[in-house]
Image (cartoon, helix red, strand yellow):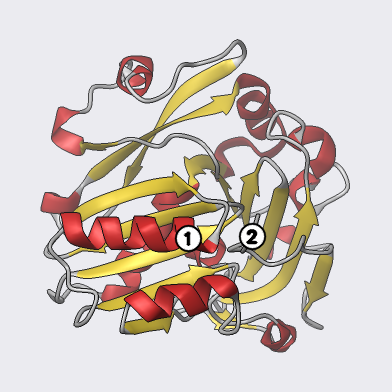
Amino acid sequence: MSASPTLPATPTLSLRDDTFDATNLTAYHLYALASPNRLRLAAMEAARQKIVAFDDLPATSLADLPALAAGTLLGQAGWARLRLGLAGGATPLLPAPLYRTGDEATYLRLHHELVSGEEALAYTLPLPAPATDIVSLFAAPGSLVQWLQQVHGPSARLLPQTSALLAGLLHQRGPSAAPRQLYLSLADHELTAVVLGAQVEFCNAFTVSTAEDVTYYTILVMQELGLNPDQDTVTIWGELTSDSATFALLSTYVRNLRFGTRPFGLQYFYYLNEVADYRHFDLFSLAFCE
């Protein structure tokens, strides 16, 4: 790759607030985001709505996640609430009024062919207005679905990474109407683009391997949705830096390019200061998923 859009492979990172009590997991919510080669975890103290633990770990595959979880926070039972987001797969969106329970595989088949051992699942994202009620369709290894229920029971919920991102963006924007804007999230060679206006107007993920890929898809989406690269603001989160090849190239085509911030409404412990605010937005946004 001539100009990788992501940072070098992230080393294992484990941060803990001094107040985190691993012997009292009922006081915390656990948020986990898994991709085929990465597992990120964040524990939030429910009483203070404060993130107090964070892990960034290498992984192999989603099917192997139960084995990997044994030595992590995800393998410990007893959390008051658990949300596990899955990244890296097809996630078609469907207006809630068109969704019928039991037809998940039929809907998903238009975008993804289920392989042996996979299950088709749906997640309904609670959004601020009925006009934006969305059901996300996604696939997950059946072994992972079974393991999650066996270990964590009814406190656990499985959903796609895209739903977490949408929940965070809508929470960040608030209930008032805002100008149409493009939001980008870049991680694990995948670029997710979301356009929000009065409702969710566009949401799609693109496989990328170079800075040119990221720039091409960004401009393509702006052109298709009638946004102006010289005038409209584009906000980006994820695995890049201000001096990266991706940011440099993208900023030559998008005049008002800016980094996003962490989700509003949560507190973050001191040790997270060593992690850039525009990273892990999707992980922390799991806090807004029912």
Task: Estimate how packed mark 2 is, as few (under 14), some (14 to 19) or many (20 or more) residues with alpha carbons within 10 Å.
Answer: few
User: Does the image show residue 166?
Assistant: no
| Amino acid type, mark 2 | Ser
Task: Say which element carries label 2.
Answer: loop
Image position, residue 197 (x, y; %): 15, 65
Image position, residue 149 (x, y; %): 63, 31
Image position, residue 52 (x, y; %): 70, 75
Q: CA distance from mark 2 to mark 1?
A: 9 Å
Of callouts 2 and 1, the N-terminal one: 2
Q: Residue furthest front?
A: 2
Is 175 placed left or right of 289 in the picture?
Answer: left
- Viewer-proximal residue among 142 and 146: 142
Residues tagged 2 and 1 counted as in contact (Cβ below 8 A): yes
| Displayed quadrant of residue 225 | bottom left
| Displayed quadrant of residue 147 | top right
Rendered residue at 31%/84% (across/down): 256
Task: Estimate how packed mark 1 is, as few (under 14), some (14 to 19) or many (20 or more) residues with alpha carbons within 10 Å.
Answer: some
Q: Is residue 121 above or below residue 43?
A: above
Which mark, residue 2? 2
Quadrant where the N terminus is found in the figure: bottom right
Callout count: 2
Q: Which residue position holds label 1?
A: 212
Task: Say which element carries label 1.
Answer: helix
- Viewer-proximal residue among 86 and 203: 203
